[in-house]
Image: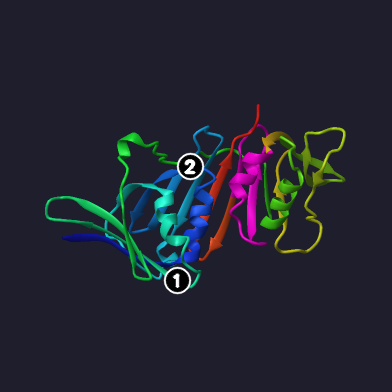
Amino acid sequence: MTQTLSATIEVQPIKTLLSTLEKLSEEAIYEFSPSGLRIRVVCAQKFKMADIWLKPDAFKTYECPETIKIGVVNDRIKDITKTLTSKDILTFDYTTDTEGISKFALEANGMRRVVKLLRLEYMNEVSTIPEFSYSYSLTTSSKEVRDYLKALGKTMAFDAILRRSEGKSVLVWRSKNDDEPIEWSPDTSSDDSERDLTASEVSSTTYTTSEVLAAVGATLRKQPMTLQGGQSVPLRAEWTPHDGFRVITLVANRE
């Protein structure tokens, strides 16, 4: 029997990973390689997508000398992690026996589960995340973003507006209900190192509230995140929920 993957990791990063994925897709292609675990996924409606990367230093131990791509139903992993606490350790291993049969297994607290793998040829593989020309970049608290989106309630959409005021760039998110609009404008005038806005040109683009909230809903507490947008381009969000763990999500703009 040949073992081509052996890794251990604290449970909390995996719970964060699953929380991010469950808002996008029930299944995903997990790509293990010497550079870590990479998952790129797009939702069925193609409204939002994510590029998730757990680098080797996100794991307690990590050995993977070659690239392995496996199709996994995310709930199969959640079946194990939902019973564990943040201090527990989860083990991944991928082995191939003498007959060429490969198995992917999880183990924690004496429980071991062999995960039935999906056939990759029937899955929607995302090779890269598209790049766009963004006219602004905002670094702020993820809690501010979540709080605003939750405050919109049943409001279907909002405008992300970048304008110039008194020689300065100002970003405003404004709900698409003219009678009682709800606005959020991060204060970037202070010396707050966790809030920063850079911009090149004015823009106004509409996004669907529920899709944006789903894309950033797995952020934790007040951890910093970077938002990028512009005229008629998707909204891009990037954050680091744990050491060695990077998440990028894209949400399509409304026409």
Name the residue beneath numbered marker 1: 88
Query: Which residue is found at the position 65% from the left and 40% from the top?
Result: 210
What colour scheme does the image use?
rainbow
Crowding near pointer 1: few (<14 within 10 Å), some, many (20+)? some
Q: Which mark is residue 114?
A: none
Q: Quadrant of the C terminus?
A: top right
Seen as rendered, the residue at the extreme top is 255
Query: Which residue is found at the position 62% from the left and 51% from the top?
Result: 217
Q: Secondary structure at mark 2?
A: loop
Q: Secondary structure at mark 1?
A: loop
Could you tell whether 216 is left or right of 90 in the image?
right
Residue 191 is situated, as x and y percent measured from the top left of the image, at 78, 64
Q: Which mark is residue 25?
A: 2
Crowding near pointer 2: few (<14 within 10 Å), some, many (20+)? some
Q: Is residue 10 above or below residue 40?
A: below
Q: Is residue 250 above or below residue 12?
A: above
Q: Nearer the viewer, residue 71 or 59?
A: 71
Q: Amino acid at mark 1?
A: Asp
Could you tell whether 219 is left or right of 84 in the image?
right
